Amino acid sequence: MSFPTFATLGTFVVDNYVYVQEDKSTQKDTQLGGGGFWACAGARIWLKPNTICMPVGGNSLTDLLGQLAEQLEKLDAQDEISMWVWREEQTGSSILQSEIKYDGHERRCSMHPYLQQIG
């Protein structure tokens, strides 16, 4: 077994964006995010996927929605060593999620399980 060249303990988050229009209708978008995720994605410029390592909450790609799982797989190599190390969680949904809501000039962000308002 080889050891990774780059490893991070940064966050892996599923960001759920909600855009409130003037008529109060909403548009929604979901993206992968978090500092650890973007560090791994950036490291792919110089390093092969099997030399990058990041622990991810959840049991497998099946814990993610189809489109997000596909995005995550595209960053990884089809190799015996994955850059994503899945941590088996004992309690409920284990992948950290955020909701970022834009309503005019106001932005609110909530992260499970903590709620915070960003001005």
Image (spheres, rainbow, N blue to C red):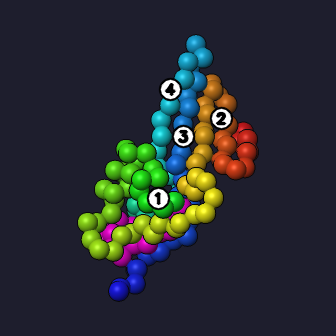
> Per the image, is 42 magenta?
no
Question: How packed is label 2: few (under 14 Cα within 10 Å), some, or many (20 or more)?
Answer: some
Q: Amino acid at mark 4?
A: Gln
Q: CA distance from mark 1 to mark 4?
A: 24 Å
17 on left or right of 107: left
Q: Position of residue 107 (x, y in %)?
A: 65, 35
Q: Which residue is mark 1?
A: 38
Sequence-wise first label, 2 or 3: 3
Q: CA distance from mark 2 to mark 3?
A: 13 Å
Q: Which residue is mark 4?
A: 27
Numbered range of the magenta stretch: 43-57
Q: Nearer the viewer's eye, disc 1 or disc 4?
A: 4
Sequence-wise first label, 3 or 4: 3
Q: Nearer the viewer's eye, disc 1 or disc 3?
A: 3
Q: Which residue is mark 3?
A: 16
Q: Nearer the viewer's eye, disc 2 or disc 3?
A: 3
Q: CA distance from mark 1 to mark 2?
A: 22 Å
Q: Which residue is mark 2?
A: 107
Q: Position of residue 91 (x, y in %)?
A: 63, 58
